[in-house]
Image (tube, coloured by chain):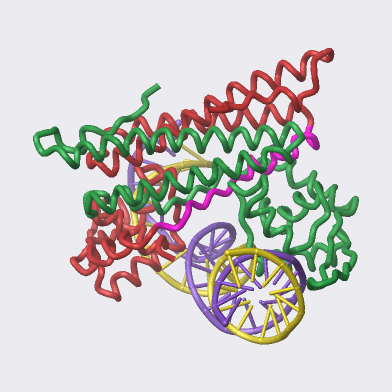
Chain colours: A green, B red, C yellow, D purple
Amino acid sequence: MALDVRILCLGALSQADASGYELQKAFKDGPFGHFVEASYGSIYPALTRLTDEGLVTFSEHTQEGRPDKKVYSILDAGKASLVAAISDMPQTDKFRSEFLFFMTFAELMEETQIMRLIDERIAIFEDNKARLDETGNDVSTLGQKFVQGYGRAMVEASLKYLRENRALVEETARGKNRPPLKDTVKVNQS
Amino acid sequence: MALDVRILCLGALSQADASGYELQKAFKDGPFGHFVEASYGSIYPALTRLTDEGLVTFSEHTQEGRPDKKVYSILDAGKASLVAAISDMPQTDKFRSEFLFFMTFAELMEETQIMRLIDERIAIFEDNKARLDETGNDVSTLGQKFVQGYGRAMVEASLKYLRENRALVEETARGKNRPPLKDTVKVNQS
DNA sequence: GCTTCCATGTAATAGGTTACATGATTTG
DNA sequence: CAAATCATGTAACCTATTACATGGAAGC
């Protein structure tokens, strides 16, 4: 698989040296955050293996008041490996959404639950948006800007859709003389 | 995990009886297509297990000119199980994009490769859009319409962003007296 | 004639997550 | 005083993918 945790680590290390701990944070909150994820249980073994393969090195840093850490740096072989990886054709995105699956069965839920689902969704995307704006400052290359812009476009489109349809669902749930819910979903047909 | 293949199968079977083969097709091309996926290697064992647990049954259908098939139906216990599953709070979406990861390292690629990447992406989304319009006819419930509309909104936002930025990247790649690529990415700031 | 579609199923393998173990320090 | 942050690592587990096995019929 082209996008395993090892390649992820190489990608992050190509931009800045980091420890395993920092890599996890970077995947979670950094500019990769919205389309990538990895746990410590996969990052640490990946770094060990990358070291064994001669793609990265590390130096140990002793810190006062904090645990020691290993700061990894990418080697030329690692850079070559990254370039090779991004020369393959990318697989199609994997998007797995429990929210959308749940919403498919909206008729099995109560209105209050549906609204709660949508509201939480909106809150999550507002968070995402805020985080994108925060991290906006430390992106510099064309690629990073493109990716960030893409993320922002998606978040904004999601929020727009959710807000428009939230209002419609709410209205319909309140009034009883109105046409059935299923005819009121507002779809943005281009 | 709330959204494993077993729940996926229950969800699909709550809407219509189907064989394992048909379920895979439904996940791939049907109304779930854009946010769910499952292979035969996971569906068949899942159906066996659901049967053992008394959540579904099947009847064997012998067909002329075609292999026999087992058509599965959801039982009341299965429906209850599905309702229980969608009562949990959904996990946040998992979105894993090789395309975006690759694009992050655009400076390591040649312009032609970047353009190829973007063009293929656009083609994929146009396909998705066409498929959404095709399957648009057999969705009927509020939930299905909501989910479909969401998918359409995402696809359209993606296409819009890709097209706008494709043009910009192309222009910048052609002219040499222009500002560097990294300053030209068009971001839709709300 | 080759490929795709129909149809089910198993085994090997890969890949990851969760939980655990450990422990000082800072923040609430 | 409890919780979160920093920091690394391992082991058990789970889940799903890939490849394989099988085979007729229909479409190109």
Residue B108 within the segment the image draws in magenta: yes
Query: Horizontal and vertical percent for residue A22?
Result: 73, 59
Question: Where on the picture, by quarter, is residue B38?
Answer: bottom left
Viewer-nearest residue: B7 or A164: A164
Viewer-nearest residue: A49 or A139: A139
Residue B102 within the segment the image draws in magenta: yes
Q: Which residue is pictured at 42% across the width and 62% down the height? A: B4
Indicate left or right for A19 with A58 as reference.
Answer: left
Q: Which residue is pictured at 62% across the width and 33% down the height? A: A149
The N terminus of chain B, quarter of image: bottom left
Indicate left or right for A57 with B87 as reference.
Answer: right
Question: Where on the picture, by quarter, is residue A55?
Answer: bottom right
Residue B25 appearing in the image: no
Query: Horizontal and vertical percent for residue B52?
Result: 30, 75
Query: Horizontal and vertical percent for residue A21?
Result: 72, 64
Q: Is residue D8 above or below residue A136?
A: below
Which contiguous range is marked in magenta? B90-109
Question: Where on the picture, by quarter, is residue A20?
Answer: bottom right
Q: Which residue is pictured at 33% across the width and 30% down the height? A: A187
Indicate left or right for D2 with B71 as reference.
Answer: right
Q: Is residue A90 above or below residue B47?
A: above
Q: Which residue is pictured at 54% across the width and 48% down the height? A: B95
